[in-house]
Amino acid sequence: ESADEVIVPAFTHISTANAFALRGAKIVFADILADTMCIDPADVIKKITPETKAVVAMHYGGYAADMVLLGDICKKNGLYLIEDAAHSIGATHNDKHLGTFGDIGCISFHETKNIHCGEGGAFLINNPELLKKAEEVFEKGSNRAAFLRNEVSEYSWTGLGSSFGMNNLSAAMLWSQLQDLGVVSEKRVAIWNDYYAAFKSIEGIILPPESESGFNAHIFYIKAQATQADGLLALLNEKGIAACRHFPPLNKSPFGEKFGKTHCTVAEAEYQKLIRLPMHIGIRKTDTEFIADIIARFLSK
């Protein structure tokens, strides 16, 4: 409803907020933690009002947000906890898959993800109370799922829904990759570790947290001083390296400001430093060393 508020991290993809804005909710932006780039539970607490209905945690690059603390906060305040696990296919935290902690989890199979089918995704219903509604939405606003289970004699229009089924060609492309998810994750982690080894002795940059068991190595990034990041990014692009910024804070975007002018100081500051480096299973160790050498030379000047 129009008065409902949903708390989302300021540092996330547009789609995270769009999912709720499209349905009339007011988006409330929360700040992030600098080490994981995930939503800050302390700021979430500050942003909760009587109108808050849900909190969204985005697991950046496959790093887990603090789901235990966020779960406690949501339970205490009667809120839904939703996971944007777009980066997290195959990633686990404490032997539990990301996307399975909250009431709902969302996985992306967009072309930029570890495995993909061009466009597509998965909707994980972890709260049984939401299953019937999810089926209705998926079945174009009908009780067709109940009909297929012989629970009703015919199906009819029971609510709002749409067509979300994946076409067979995309599904076949995805299915073959799902069989190799473990192999893909292992290769990506090996490349991520090559990057880390090549960069760990370079002064003037901050590296992401070290990988741990269950990490899926979706992204490798570095942080440079904000005054140097633009020049470094331009040099990398000039050398043919597809480095880029990531996630301009939504609270400072033209449309995000329509929900009120807010400051998320950590997200705004870290965005100015973060440079995302190429990450795919075709990257070789020599590539990571080449990129590291360019960055080391730039920073030594």
Image: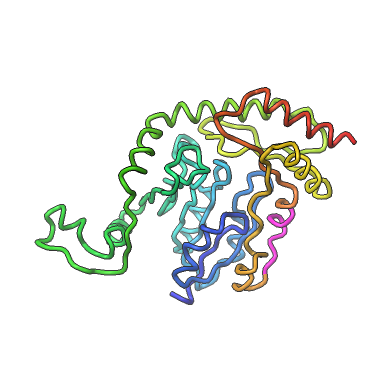
Determine whether, in the image, residue 273 is placed left or right of residue 116. right
Instruction: In the displayed orientation, state which residue is furthest to the left.
Output: 153
Q: Identify the residue at image location x=50%, y=73%.
A: 51
The residue stretch that appears in magenta: 262-269
Taking the spot 82% from the left edge, 38% from the top edge, the residue there is 204
Visible residue check, residue 241: yes
In the figure, 152 relative to 25: above or below? above
Which quarter of the rendered picture does the N terminus lie within? bottom left
Looking at the magenta stretch, what is its main secondary structure? helix
State the image quarter where residue 267 is shown.
Answer: bottom right
At which x and y percent is residue 148?
Answer: 16, 53
Q: Is residue 129 visible?
A: no
Q: Taking 197 as reference, is 73 left or right? A: left
Instruction: Look at the image and say whether residue 267 sits in the magenta stretch.
Output: yes
Determine the residue located farthest toward the top in the rendered image.
286
x and y percentages locating residue 207 in the rendered image: 71, 37
What x and y, as percent, mark residue 17?
A: 53, 62
Q: How many numbered circles does the render carry?
A: 0
Residue 127 falls inside the magenta stretch: no
Name the residue: 31% across, 54% down. 128
Residue drawn at point x = 58 percent, y = 46 percent: 60
83 is higher (above) or lower (below) than 17: above
Q: Position of residue 23 (x, y in %)?
A: 44, 69
Foreground residue, 253 or 152?
253
